[in-house]
Image: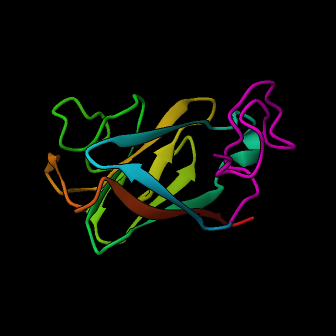
Amino acid sequence: MSVFGVSSGTFPAGSGDTAGYGFPGTNKSTLSSKLDRGKYISMQFRVPSDAAWNGRLGFFHMTPGSSTYLQLAIAPCPGQFAADSLYPLPGAGCSVGAKSSDIPWMITTGSTASCKLEPGKTYYLNFINAFPGSLDTPLCAGAQCSFQMRNSHNY
């Protein structure tokens, strides 16, 4: 899945980095796919470390199919959600659970009301079709849950 619009072994043009996972990329398209019931997806991404990226912002937009809820979180570990007692980013705008969810992000070394993504760090965008606070209860009726996602940004 090339959500960010570039190969996972590349880095954004002008980032100054020599390794990366394609974030934030150039793809603003909406991706539609399916997720096995009761499973989650973790998408690894690395924030560019070059100071030229400081202050860039955007958001991940997720829409579950069949009017189910979707849990969405940015974390340093795959599969970590706000329901996890060890979730490291509480109150930072880095997790949400709703029928349609946005996580605004900002690449910064300073403070922000958006999910703060520190330059040079690796994160995971984790998502699952489940009711807020209850990751063990999948909500879609079939064997697979449909979803749509988009990574939007300001450049």
The main secondary structure of the magenta stretch is loop
**Closer to the camera in the image, 40 or 114:** 40
Which x, y percent locates residue 63? 42, 69
**Closer to the camera in the image, 85 or 135:** 135
Which x, y percent locates residue 41? 42, 42
In this rendering, would 99 be left or right of 134? right
Q: How many marks?
A: 0
Residue 111 appears anywhere in the view = no
Which x, y percent locates residue 154? 68, 67
Q: Residue furthest front?
A: 143
In this rendering, would 13 be left or right of 132? right
Q: Residue furthest bottom?
A: 67
In this rendering, would 9 be left or right of 140? right
Which x, y percent locates residue 44? 54, 35
Vertical position of residue 113 compared to residue 45: above or below: below
Q: Residue at x 57, y 46 (%)?
A: 108
**Closer to the camera in the image, 93 or 84:** 84
Q: Residue at x 77, y 45 (%)?
A: 6
Q: Residue at x 42, y 30 (%)?
A: 76
Membership of 92 in magenta stretch: no
Q: Quadrant of the C terminus?
A: bottom right
Residue 20 appears anywhere in the view = yes
Membership of 8 in magenta stretch: yes
In this rendering, would 102 be left or right of 92? right
**Closer to the camera in the image, 104 or 127:** 127
Q: Residue furthest top?
A: 18
Q: Residue at x 79, y 29 (%)?
A: 17
Which portion, as a residue range, is magenta? 1-28
Based on the displayed image, in which of its 4 quarters is residue 58 positioned?
A: bottom right
